[in-house]
Amino acid sequence: MPLNPDFPWLRAWNGPLTADLVQRPGDFGLGRVPERLQPDATTSMVCGFCATGCGLTVHLREGEAVNLSADPRYPVNLGMACPKGWEALAPVSAPDRATAPLLRNRATGALEPVTWVRAMHEFVGRMKGVQERHGAESVAFLSTGQITTEEMTLLGALFRSGMGGRHCDSNTRQCMATAHVAYKQSIGFDAPPYTYADFEESDCLVFVGSNPCIAHPIMWQRVLRNPHKPAIIVLDPRRTETAMAATLHVPIAPKSDLALLYALANALLARGAVDRTYIDAHTDGFAEFERFVAEFTPERACADAGIPAETFASLVEAVANAKRASFWWTMGVNQGHESTRTAQALINLALMTGSFGRPGTGANSITGQCNAMGSRLFAHATGLPCGREFQNPAHRADVASVLGWPEERIPSTPGWAYDQIIDGIESGAIRGLWIIATNTAHSWIHQTRFRELAKKLEFLVVQDLYADTDTAKLADLILPAAGWGEKDGTLINSERRIGLVKRVRRPPGEALSDFAIFRLVANAWGCGDLFRAWRTPEEVFRLMQRLSAGRPCDFSGIEGYRHLDQSGGIQWPYTAADAAKAGPGPLPVEWRERRLFADGRFHTPTGKARFLFDAPRPPVEMPDADFPLVLLTGRGSSAQWHTNTRTGRSAVLRQMYPADCYVEVNPEDVARLGLLDGRPARLETRRGALEVNVVSTPTVPSGRVFVPMHYDGVNRLTAESFDPHSRQPSYKHCAARLVPRKS
Ligand SMILES: Nc1nc2c(c(=O)[nH]1)N[C@H]1C(S)=C(S)[C@@H](COP(=O)(O)OP(=O)(O)OC[C@H]3O[C@@H](n4cnc5c(=O)[nH]c(N)nc54)[C@H](O)[C@@H]3O)O[C@H]1N2
Ligand SMILES: Nc1nc2c(c(=O)[nH]1)N[C@H]1C(S)=C(S)[C@@H](COP(=O)(O)OP(=O)(O)OC[C@H]3O[C@@H](n4cnc5c(=O)[nH]c(N)nc54)[C@H](O)[C@@H]3O)O[C@H]1N2
Ligand code: SF4
Ligand SMILES: [Mo]
């Protein structure tokens, strides 16, 4: 394929990326390490692991990061950080980073380093080739909640408006799709209402399918600062670290949440512990809900959930007595076969008790990845930016006018969700796939199927920090990406706080920021003109602000990156009217922690929140004689991040978790199954098997076992099943058996 004529600078740049090019300020969002970073100074930025969004102080020598500490002034973490935060430089400093594009030699099958020019030739030539043969919609991308919002915005626009693609999704589907859909349906917009001060102000915190001691340790520190001697209730099939620290553990049977939460609503009604004034003024559909929950008696709930009657009574008592009840949920809810309704059952509880918009209250989804919230607003997967809909002509016109593009450029049809894209590979509808900052071959439910299907693709591109991830190993082309600390941009945390990340390190070799790679692709593809005003991350941030204007997430009042830097991040919304009240410069203290819906007005057409509910259903795969155990999966330690590509590269973090995969088994089951504590066993499901070491522990009840998701192979076991509303995978329920291994 001839080089695209719109791409003269790349034609000239026919070789390795030179130091000179890297240092040309402003080019492709790279730029030199900013002037303001004096030698041996410090600067601050937010952590790039979890959605807590802690502020970290970066210590610099001669303008480059040499060390990190927790930022005492940042309103999120108040000087605390978890092990991953302290070790955040280790994954980017690893000696085995991907440093040049790698192309698979079709004759030998080996991956060989190539120039960026060649890499772009291949990318454009082969993706366009697939499109010519099989139609524009035959290429797809899978992206992430772990790149900057500016990068997500650019990628979505590039793919849908520039490359003519349609099907794209991100790993946020595995994680936050449920919360997104639940909020949207119930309160009209994906707007988690809380601020972290609510952890400290609540007098009753109900955590459902959430283990913050491990997964959000700094949020848990905020709970520990609560001076009100709160009731802390944990609904989890396992006696987790969080459950142990709680005032009440409700050890419910896996996936019995929905029925139990309806029974809780019914019991609160029976006690009169509901706020009728609030319900009448601010909600729709309560009468139907009240009738619906009447059949969920305490007896039925306790039988279904396998919990003692006293435990249920204590739960009801605690919520009924609370003045400021808050309901928090994470993956034990989101990853389920009826997860949207379960999340909405929590929203219903908050609404009926008037626990919305006041300090210490809320139906609060805790986010996972550092920028899942950015992805929910800007990824182009489920809609146009800022909760706009593809099919809505007025929404398309808005976007076109902000971007200065003809309206025909704005996509008008939704694309497929993650699972549909995978099915599309099987059916032959998807032939080219671009995977960015996610490790599908490990993290996708039923990974064996994905690995088999990947072989069917005509072209697989993987863009990652490392060339040896399970997904990168399958690629035809690997694009080496800069990581956290090597690029500028913003991330949005769980409480809607927009925080800044900065370039405080030079990426190794020829690795480029994802932003720069997307710009390269745009130019090579021949649609670079569309993105003339998208040269730097901050220019794109300005566009994002204009896209947000007038929407519930409006942050058009932010003055720019410097303003975020001075203010400890800024929560959306922050409108131009807010800015006029707060005044210029660093945000006044009273603006630094803000919650939503104090006025009880929601984003639905009526301004009222809706009670949404459905009859509970059993999970698709129940234990039986052959596979008698329920397999639970989730986070294993605060030192491991997902598929461990990053955390596995820190020698310090490696000391903090077992090197080999393990399964937690109740001591009774260990004895009954002839297993031995600390010895290997085979964990089998209908889809595959995994070698694991047995950890005998009473924290999992008999009949259930738990495997952390961080070790490769866990998703050989899981069963493909999805929530019908959010299409989020149900990672936390399938039937399994454990067999002692004779060794
Ligand atoms: N250290 C560390 N921290 C992380 C991450 C990480 O990989 N490592 N990942 C981040 C991301 S992306 C996410 S999404 C969050 C996840 O954060 P969490 O959701 O808190 O973590 P998980 O361990 O996946 O799941 C939470 C709990 O759900 C329980 N559970 C399983 N099935 C059910 C059920 O049917 N009902 C109920 N009520 N509970 C159930 C599990 O036993 C588990 O204890 O963590 C974030 N933080
Ligand atoms: N069984 C089971 N499976 C699960 C879960 C579970 O609880 N149980 N949880 C699910 C959840 S909630 C989630 S969020 C997913 C997470 O699943 P993944 O997203 O697959 O996990 P990560 O290991 O975070 O993968 C991110 C990849 O991006 C790379 N990367 C990091 N930073 C950058 C960057 O700036 N640019 C680029 N280009 N690459 C970068 C990393 O090296 C890594 O390879 O797993 C899901 N899978
Ligand atoms: S709690 Fe999350 S954001 Fe804070 S330091 Fe740890 S990984 Fe980073
Ligand atoms: Mo997640």
Image: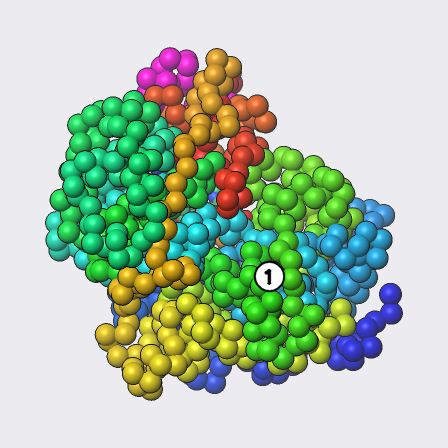
* Residue at the image point whose x is 63% and y is 35% from the top: 448
The region drawn magenta spans 666-682
Q: Is residue 603 above or below residue 587?
A: above
What x and y, as percent, mark residue 125? 81, 61
* Residue at the image point whose x is 32% and y is 63% from the top: 601
What x and y, as percent, mark residue 720? 56, 34
* Residue at the image point whose x is 31% and y is 46% from the top: 286
Q: Nearer the viewer, residue 33 or 191?
A: 191
The residue identified by callout 1 is 390
Q: Does 679 lie within the magenta span?
A: yes
Q: Is residue 675 visible?
A: yes
Q: Nearer the viewer, residue 227 or 119?
A: 227
What x and y, as percent, mark residue 611? 35, 47
Location of residue 238 (image quadrant): top left
- Quadrant holding the N terminus: bottom right
**Is 342 positioned to the left or the right of 661 in the image?**
left
* Residue at the image point whose x is 39% and y is 52% from the top: 186
Q: Residues within 10 Å of mark 1 (few under 14, many from 20)?
A: many
- Identified by mark 1, the residue type is Phe
